[in-house]
Image: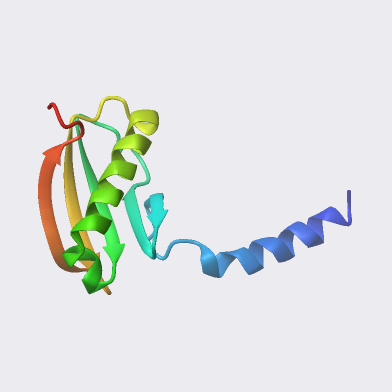
Amino acid sequence: MSRCVPALFLLALLAGPVLPASAGERTLLRHAGVEVRVAEDDWCAAQVTLRIHGRRSTFTDQALLDKLYGGIRSVLGMECAEARRLQLLGLVGAGKSMLRRRQPVTAGS
């Protein structure tokens, strides 16, 4: 057991740089270099705000946005059944807003 502690400490140090840069957020979905994040605590509600972090081209690629939206709906079905509406915020670089959209979680809503 005493050998495990230094190994776990080293693993924690090496894992540090790959953790999300924004404290208080967690990654809900990752696809094609794009991350969809939510606030870490108390994010599940009737309206969910999602921050989509990607490249500038992400927000002009409708096929990619459709895939992301489908993935978001699938994940929310498991993670937050209360969600009825989404507020999507698309961010590039240090937070420059590229997309702001509200839409229902399901097509029939």
What residue sits 39% from the left and 62% below the top?
32
How many numbered discs, if any? 0
Residue placed most toward the observer, 40 or 59? 59
Q: Where is residue 56 in the image (x, y as percent from the top left)?
A: 22, 73
Q: Who is closer to the viewer here, 90 or 94? A: 90
Kindly identify the residue that appears in the image at 37 percent across and 46 percent down: 40
Question: At 37% from the left edge and 37% from the top edge, which residue is drawn?
Answer: 75
Residue found at the far front of this picture: 63
Q: Quadrant of residue 47?
A: top left
User: Is residue 78 depicted above or below 29 in this figure?
Assistant: above
Q: Position of residue 98 (x, y in %)?
A: 15, 66
Q: Give the percent coordinates (x, y) of residue 55.
A: 28, 71
Using the image as rendered, state which of residue 99 and residue 61 is in the foreground.
Answer: 61
Q: Does residue 21 appear to the left or right of 17 in the view shown?
A: left
**Is residue 17 shown left or right of residue 81?**
right
Rendered-image quadrant of the C terminus: top left
Residue toward you, 36 or 23? 36
Image position, residue 74 (x, y; %): 34, 36
Q: Which colour scheme is used?
A: rainbow
Seen as rendered, the residue at the extreme right is: 2
Look at 18% across and 29% down and name the residue there.
84
